[in-house]
Amino acid sequence: MGNARKISMKTLERIVLYKRILGDLAAKGQKTLYSHQLAELAHNSPAQVRRDLMITGYSGTPRRGYTTEDLIKKISVTLNETAEQKIALVGIGNLGRAILAYFNYQQPSFSIAAAFDSDETRVDRVIAGCRCYHLREFESKVKELGVTLGIVTVPASSAQTVADMMVSAGIKAILNFAPVPLKVPSNVFADRIDITMALEKIAYLASIK
């Protein structure tokens, strides 16, 4: 994870958000912006934006602000994204297929190098440009392809087993979509995306409006 380990989680989340916003602006042809403009788009304060961006070593000018493309590059270096990040996905169901399509067509900094499943009908094929393998080939393929990141899209009952397999194969960070927390060693980072929990939160907020 490199530099990311020296950055607090909250700061890291904000910097990743800035990079997403900057990418959208660059795609629309915007070449420069000021800290107050980025702060407004990120629902943040200009002072916080400037403090966060100091971590990248890049500073704008009072006259022109930040150069969009240069700032994207600096953030990418800070996040160790100068090289393509290779991912292994386990679970080629509906969610897994949707993620394959999203990453391989929308995320140039990341590549799902291989997908895996224990269902024979889902393997030995290409989905959204990604080769799919049987789970028994996981460790050998991860090492062969140089994969360091994992995505778990299996049922809750299988998630921990898959996580253990990923750790054993040398995966350093796991993004978990299964509705259950994972237990991993201290040198492996695991983050969980719980769609049901997020829906419950927004449903409550909607009910009190």
Image (cartoon, rainbow, N blue to C red):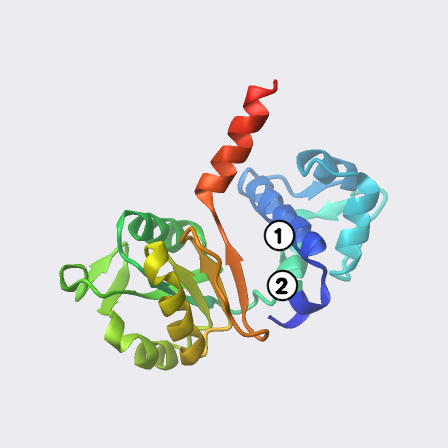
View extreme (top): residue: 209
Q: Looking at the image, is 163 positioned above or below residue 145? A: above
Query: In which quadrant will I find the C terminus?
Result: top right
- Mark-to-mark CA distance, 2 and 1: 8 Å
Label disc, if present, on residue 16 of the rendered structure = 1
Decide: few, some or many residues near mark 1? Use Cα within 10 Å; few <14, some 14-19, many ≥20.
Answer: some
Locate residue 34, reporting x and y percent: 76, 40
Q: Which residue is drawn at 66% across and 58% down?
A: 75
Q: Disc 2 marks which amino acid?
A: Leu
Q: Which residue is drawn at 76% across and 53% down?
A: 52
Label disc, if present, on residue 104 of the rendered structure = none
What is the secondary structure assignment of the residue under circle 2?
Answer: loop
Q: Disc 1 marks which amino acid?
A: Val
Locate residue 202, reporting x and y percent: 54, 31
Q: Looking at the image, is 169 positioned above or below residue 96? A: below
Q: Looking at the image, is 71 positioned above or below residue 46? A: below
What is the secondary structure assignment of the residue under circle 1?
Answer: helix
Residue 24, quarter of the rendered image: top right
Label disc, if present, on residue 79 of the rendered structure = 2
Locate residue 68, reporting x and y percent: 66, 48
Query: In which quadrant will I find the N terminus?
Result: bottom right
Q: In this view, does 3 lie to the left or right of 166?
A: right
Q: In this view, does 165 lie to the left or right of 110?
A: left
Q: Residue at x 67, y 68 (%)?
A: 5
Viewer-nearest residue: 174 or 72: 174
Decide: few, some or many residues near mark 2? Use Cα within 10 Å; few <14, some 14-19, many ≥20.
Answer: some
Contact, mark 2 vs mark 1 (Cβ under 8 Å): yes
